[in-house]
Image (cartoon, rainbow, N blue to C red):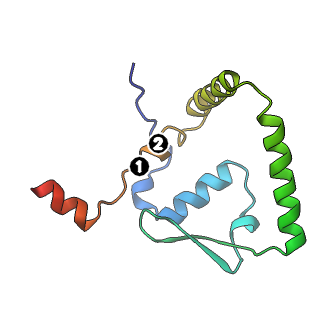
Amino acid sequence: MPVEPIKPSAPTEKLSLKAEVDALLVELGVEPISHSGGTLVARTPITGETVAHVREVDAAGAASAIDKAHAAFLAWRLVPSPKRGELVRLLGEELRASRPWAGWCPSRPARSSPKASAKSRR
């Protein structure tokens, strides 16, 4: 049974992609300081638009983040794969049920490249 994507709650057609990303991160509880004011530019592959400026970290900060991610991976890989798949599926269902953007984000159409447009006209 096909699932229809859920439309975002705000009229996003009038918002820039950066404004959409900012709104989504705020809704997820991500502090604006984590994606603004930094020197590293994050661009969307959809349009090339800058969507964030993230901060650089020193070697110790990077090592700490890597250690935390590795510890989480070691715990997650102990969960049998069918159970992990079921958990991911259930998480997706919960997100789609409670967050208007969850079904919408992955379905946003990307701009087609000139090559793709040329091929479709043939």
Foreground residue, 15 or 45?
45
Is 100 positioned to the left or the right of 72 in the image? left
Amino acid carrying label 2: it is Trp
According to the picture, the residue beneath numbered tag 2 turns out to be: 104
CB atoms at circles 2 and 1 under 8 Å apart?
Answer: yes
Is 58 positioned to the left or the right of 106 in the image? right
- Tell me which residue sits at (69%, 67%) in the image: 35
Element at label 1: loop
Give the percent coordinates (x, y) of residue 2.
38, 24
How many angstroms separate mark 2 from mark 1 (CA)?
6 Å
Count of numbered badges drawn on the protein: 2
Q: 119 above or below 57?
A: above
Element at label 2: loop
Is 5 positioned to the left or the right of 118 in the image? right
Amino acid carrying label 1: it is Arg
Give the percent coordinates (x, y) of residue 114.
24, 67
Foreground residue, 56 or 17?
56
According to the picture, the residue beneath numbered tag 1 turns out to be: 108
Foreground residue, 74 or 102?
74
Q: Residue furthest bottom?
A: 39
Q: Quadrant of the C terminus?
A: bottom left
